[in-house]
Image (tube, grey):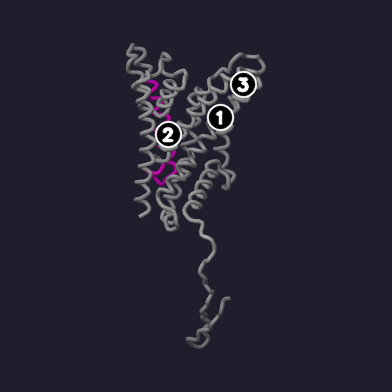
């Protein structure tokens, strides 16, 4: 109970000392695991604008709809024409829609980390029972989960539509499973790269431009150089050039090991040996992204 004690220092002085009765907290302490889960849930919700202003919901929800609409149209066409197969393989869908995925990463990766850097709230996180690794894992997992939701939902629409069209259950289930593996790997890779790039600057606009440059421009540049190599009959170089773009990395992995048709010029993906290198490079980039984020936030949290 607050106690008010007058303090008379002179005639007419109305100064008061208030004892507001601070007490120690003796309730349950939920610890690091709870803090990590809460940060993950908050970051995942924020990736789709939930719990934020209406304006913040427009772009992520719009991109989600843009990802799903082509899948719904393909399903409608397949059902109406009684087609024997879907017009696009499950593993190809994310490659076709890579521009939308890259735009989503560019918009949400800076939102996830840039505001904490700009308003210098990162040290406040670490003043609680949460460590640098907890913060990085929560942010990484949240953006990867948001990306998986963005990329896996259209595949689910295709799969349900294929079953409604009475296409072969075994073939569609196998293709759907391969597609899920592909987009899971893509989500981890794009989330890691996006967060690393966005964490370099506290300015969201710069972060968006940098992520777009790394994901979209690199894909366009590699595709152009691959096309030139194919036109000059230097087909041996096409697979190696695919190592220099995140999207072509995923394309190479799924064409080598998931039975996907490659988007490389000529349709020839990497060989099994080259595919193994693609897998190692992809996993190495994911691990390196996590390591760079840890290093970055250990410095910020000091």
Name the residue at 52% across, 38% down. 146
Mark 1 or mark 2: whose residue is earlier in sequence: 1
Nearest the viewer among 264 and 58 is 264
Secondary element type, mark 3: helix
Crowding at dot 1, Cα within 10 Å, few <14 / some 14-19 / many 20+, comes out as many
- Tally of numbered discs: 3
Name the residue at 58% across, 48% down. 51
In the shown orientation, is residue 138 left or right of residue 2? left
Nearest the viewer among 6 and 175 is 175
The image shows residue 166 at horizontal and vertical percentages of 65, 18
Q: Give the alpha-carbon distance from disc 1 to disc 2, as whole Å.
A: 19 Å
- Examine the residues drawn in magenta and state their main secondary structure: helix
Residue 280 colored in magenta in the image: no
Residue 300 badge: none
The image shows residue 157 at horizontal and vertical percentages of 60, 27
The image shows residue 244 at horizontal and vertical percentages of 35, 27
First to last magenta residue range: 198-225
Name the residue at 51% across, 52% down. 34
Residue 67 badge: 1
Residue 189 badge: 2
Q: Nearer the viewer, mark 1 or mark 2?
A: 2
Q: Nearer the viewer, mark 2 or mark 3?
A: 3
* Residue lying furthest front: 170
Mark 3 or mark 1: whose residue is earlier in sequence: 1
Secondary element type, mark 1: helix
Secondary element type, mark 2: helix
Q: Give the alpha-carbon distance from disc 3 to disc 1, as whole Å.
A: 18 Å
The image shows residue 32 at horizontal and vertical percentages of 46, 53
Q: Give the alpha-carbon distance from disc 2 to disc 3, as whole Å.
A: 29 Å
Label 3, on which residue? 162
């Amino acid at each position: 109970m607050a106690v008010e004690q007058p303090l008379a220092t002179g005639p007419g002085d109305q100064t008061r000392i208030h004892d507001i009765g601070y007490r120690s907290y003796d309730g349950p302490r939920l610890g690091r695991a709870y803090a990590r889960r809460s940060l993950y849930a908050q970051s995942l919700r924020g990736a789709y604008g939930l719990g934020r202003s209406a304006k913040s919901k427009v772009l992520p929800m719009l991109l989600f709809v843009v990802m799903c609409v082509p899948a719904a149209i393909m399903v409608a066409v397949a059902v109406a024409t009684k087609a024997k197969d879907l017009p696009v393989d499950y593993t190809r869908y994310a490659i076709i829609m890579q521009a939308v995925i890259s735009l989503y990463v560019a918009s949400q990766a800076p939102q996830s980390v840039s505001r904490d850097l700009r308003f210098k709230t990162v040290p406040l996180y670490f003043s609680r029972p949460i460590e640098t690794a907890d913060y990085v894992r929560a942010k990484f997992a949240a953006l990867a989960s948001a990306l998986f939701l963005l990329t896996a939902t259209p595949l689910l629409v295709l799969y349900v539509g294929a079953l409604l069209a009475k296409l072969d259950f075994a073939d569609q289930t196998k293709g759907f499973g391969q597609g899920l593996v592909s987009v899971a790997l893509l989500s981890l890779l794009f989330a890691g790269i996006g967060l690393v790039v966005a964490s370099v600057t506290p300015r969201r606009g710069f972060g968006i431009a940098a992520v777009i440059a790394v994901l979209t421009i690199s894909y366009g540049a590699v595709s152009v150089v691959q096309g030139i190599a194919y036109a000059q009959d230097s087909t041996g170089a096409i697979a190696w050039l695919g190592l220099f773009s995140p999207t072509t990395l995923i394309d190479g992995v799924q064409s080598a090991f998931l039975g996907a048709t490659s988007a490389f010029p000529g349709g020839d993906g990497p060989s099994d040996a080259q595919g193994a290198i693609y897998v190692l490079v992809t996993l190495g980039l994911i691990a390196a992204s996590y390591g760079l984020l840890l290093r970055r936030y250990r410095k910020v949290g000091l």
